């Protein structure tokens, strides 16, 4: 049994046709058929039912197909690993980043990384934090930027990036505008501008208020932090955002203050445990941790 026989077999199963498989593999149909027959003779059992045109698998064929897929995947991984050893002359990384986090922390970091490793292609996809975690777990992303805590950290390698406080934002005419800090309990009668449900900050802050004895009255939700600040500036409600966002704001119609009890917004790089991480991916993680 050799890898070529398994490759032929897997392609026939995928295509459900000797003709289509031979076209896909760029070999003649007799050569393909001979390869499959040789595999069956070596194993000593029929793998494909040839009594109809669909080339259905026998029970044994299904088992061989499952193992063959694993073997092919390992061969691909080996080739990728060997390729990575060429001093990062080529490579690619797929990263999932929540939109707010991406705009805050990563433009300069990614630009610096590209300058240092110009031949590594960085493919960035913006999802809400919860979807980033799920996509890393399912293998869509090699690397994800997540908001902690995760529902189940045992499935991931977690590299802590930054931790900062969530600040309260009010209009300059608000009764609390001159305060330096406010307790959550004092906000029971307020109307809130919140992030959309797909963002980790939504659940984090909502849970915090519930723990203080009330559910916040959310009148508006947005996925854009600058728009949220403009709504507060228009005196339509109050909001909460991480300190780094507040420090970027130039709108003089809003005021920022400490929110008690302190809620920390923690960011981390995550990868799936027991899944191969490319050399380019490891280098990227090391790079951003140093930044």
Image (cartoon, rainbow, N blue to C red):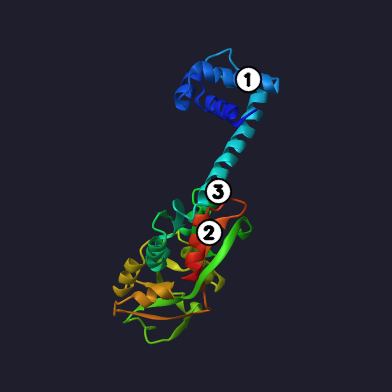
Residue 177 against residue 198 in the figure, above or below: below
Disc 1, disc 2: CB below 8 Å? no
Q: Which residue is mark 1?
A: 38
Q: CA distance from mark 2 to mark 3?
A: 12 Å
Q: Residues within 10 Å of mark 2 (few under 14, many from 20)?
A: few
Disc 3, disc 1: CB below 8 Å? no
The disc at residue 81 is: 3
x and y, in percent, of residue 149 in the image: 56, 65
Query: Residue shown at 48%/27% (left/top)?
Result: 25
* Label 3 element class: helix
Residue 216 against residue 259 in the figure, above or below: above
Query: Residue shown at 46%/53% (left/top)?
Result: 93
Residue 289 versus residue 280: which sits nearer the camera? 280
Q: Earlier in the sequence, mark 3 or mark 1?
A: 1
x and y, in percent, of residue 172 in the image: 32, 81
* Label 1 element class: helix
In terms of image quadrants, where is residue 100? bottom left
Q: Earlier in the sequence, mark 1 or mark 2?
A: 1
Q: CA distance from mark 1 to mark 2?
A: 42 Å
Residue 102 versus residue 222: which sits nearer the camera? 102
């Amino acid at each position: 049994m050799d890898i070529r026989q398994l490759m032929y077999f897997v392609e026939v199963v995928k295509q459900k046709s000797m003709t289509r498989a031979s076209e896909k593999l760029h070999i003649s149909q007799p050569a393909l058929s001979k390869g499959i027959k040789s595999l069956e003779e070596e194993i000593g059992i029929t793998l494909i039912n040839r009594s109809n045109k669909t080339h259905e698998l026998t029970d044994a064929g299904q088992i061989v197909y499952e193992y063959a897929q694993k073997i092919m995947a390992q061969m691909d991984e080996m080739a990728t690993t060997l390729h990575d050893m060429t001093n990062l002359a080529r490579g690619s990384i797929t990263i999932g980043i929540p939109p707010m986090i991406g705009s805050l922390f990563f433009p300069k970091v990614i630009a610096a990384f590209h300058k240092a490793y110009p031949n590594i292609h960085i493919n960035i996809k913006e999802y809400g934090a919860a979807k980033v975690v799920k996509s890393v777990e399912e293998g869509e992303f090699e690397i994800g930027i997540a908001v902690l805590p995760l529902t189940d950290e045992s499935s991931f390698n977690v590299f802590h990036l930054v931790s900062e406080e969530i600040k309260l934002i009010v209009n300059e005419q608000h009764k609390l505008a001159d305060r330096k800090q406010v307790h959550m309990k004092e906000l029971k009668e307020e109307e809130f501008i919140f992030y959309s449900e797909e963002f980790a900050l939504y659940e984090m802050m909502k849970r915090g208020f519930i723990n203080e004895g009330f559910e916040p009255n959310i009148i508006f939700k947005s996925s854009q932090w600058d728009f949220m600040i403009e709504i507060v500036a228009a005196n339509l409600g109050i909001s909460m955002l991480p300190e780094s966002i507040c420090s970027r704001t130039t709108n003089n119609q809003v005021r920022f203050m400490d929110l008690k009890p302190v809620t920390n917004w923690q960011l981390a790089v995550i990868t799936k445990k027991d899944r191969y991480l490319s050399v380019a991916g490891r280098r990227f993680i090391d790079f951003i941790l140093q930044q």
